[in-house]
Image: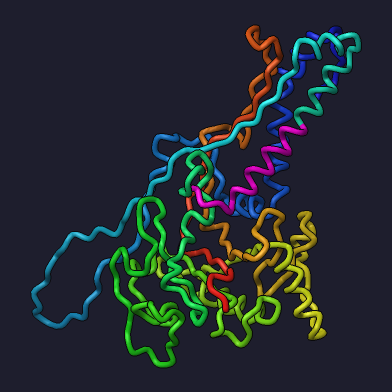
Amino acid sequence: MADVLPTSSTEGVELVHSHAPHYWRDKSDLTIRGRIWLYLMEMYGTMEFNVDASYAGVWNIMNKLPDVVPQGDSATITFDEHNSMDQLTVDLRGYRATDRLGHKNWLINRGNQNRIVNIYDEKSENLLKAMRKMINADLYIDGYAANNANRYIGLNSFMGYDAGNTAVTDRLAYPSDTYGGKSTVLGALGGTAASGVTGAETYNANFSSHFPDETFSEEYDCLTPLLVNYTSSGWTNSTWKTNCEEVLRFAIDVQANRGAASDESNAPNLAMSGRKLFTDFKEYFSARNQIIQPVANAIDLGFPETLNFEGTWLTFDYDCPSTECYLMNPGSMEYFSPQDDLFDVFGPEWNLSAMSFLYLVSNYGNFRWQPKMFAKLAPFASA
């Protein structure tokens, strides 16, 4: 943190204070590059800092297109104003971690010019580890759940389902949640599904359509994630270790074709699972004498345990729930913050009432998601 030695322990604290912002700026970048999902977000340009927080949490989504009708000669033309947008909102949330150097401890260590700097080196590393752990773990939380009012809006903030409408025979769970003030239920924002599609299957007995096999108007599944019940009796087998290839291929293919609001393919390019599911996946192919090749680019980026499954990067994450897998499209998720970097640092500052040098690291921001482009594979209902 410091490249010159202080002449006294008080100057050591002052030196730490002056160098802390530079230290944490470097660590912000390393934190992003140390997590594959953050790195891919940075690569897609979906991490934004120094935003105006008064509007960053409110944004419009296009969920419908103007009507196009066949025309003939001499027809009367009707002009209607078309509103293609709905609005979503999320609030600013964040985290902090603190430490202190008490007066007594300062007195004990002030005899050595290097001790104060070394003490704060250790405190900074510990604060960094704590903040990294919390931010990464909260990628998966439901930010609308009780006691989570100040935590990020994570993946499970829009992955809720109706257990009463999800049975072991259903290959898809029934989406039922609220995100950004809007419902994730199929058809909640309007829209229609085509009927009578040849070969269309029923993936949940309570769906009013053959989702996702049919074609839909844009608003029908605009905010609906794909919830795959990998323990369903509807698959060839009903455990992840025996059907992971089938359910992953199904989910990836479905998501690649859910481009209702875009003319481009929205194939998820990252599948993150808990460690157990990742190991089971490798053992599934090993038992069949098949080898899934690692992603060369991921190895170069420092993520060697990343496999290439039909073009999707498959890896595990320590904080991902052990029985779950998430198909993520980093180009369809955004992180915004009014700060200059991921972390703001305050101190160390002397506080008379506490008789200590106080040190605080702060983060404020949140995620904006496009739920349609994400999928969750989990044992939603099993025998």
The vertical placement of 53 against 105, above or below, is below
Foreground pick, 365 / 378: 378
Looking at the image, which residue is at 54% across and 70% down? 380
How far across and how far down the image is residue 141, in percent?
55, 51
Residue 120 appears in the figure: yes
Is 139 inside the magenta-drawn segment? Answer: yes
Tell me the quarter of the picture where residue 178 sits.
Answer: bottom left
Using residue 276 as the reference point, say whether residue 172 is left or right of it.
left
Report the magenta stretch's main SS. Answer: helix
Tell me the quarter of the picture where residue 354 sits.
Answer: top right
How far across and how far down the image is residue 105, in percent?
81, 14
Is 50 inside the magenta-drawn segment? Answer: no
Foreground pick, 100 / 282: 100
Quadrant of the frame with the C terminus: bottom right
How far across and how far down the image is residue 188, in percent?
32, 65
The vertical placement of 89 against 263, above or below, is above
Q: Which residues are magenta?
A: 125-143
Tell me the quarter of the picture where residue 54 sits.
Answer: top left
Q: Farthest residue toward the front?
A: 383
The vertical placement of 210 against 62, above or below, is below
Looking at the image, which residue is at 79% across and 82% down? 290
The colour scheme of the drawn protein is rainbow
Looking at the image, which residue is at 75% across and 29% down? 124
Quadrant of the frame with the N terminus: top right
Residue 11 appears in the figure: no
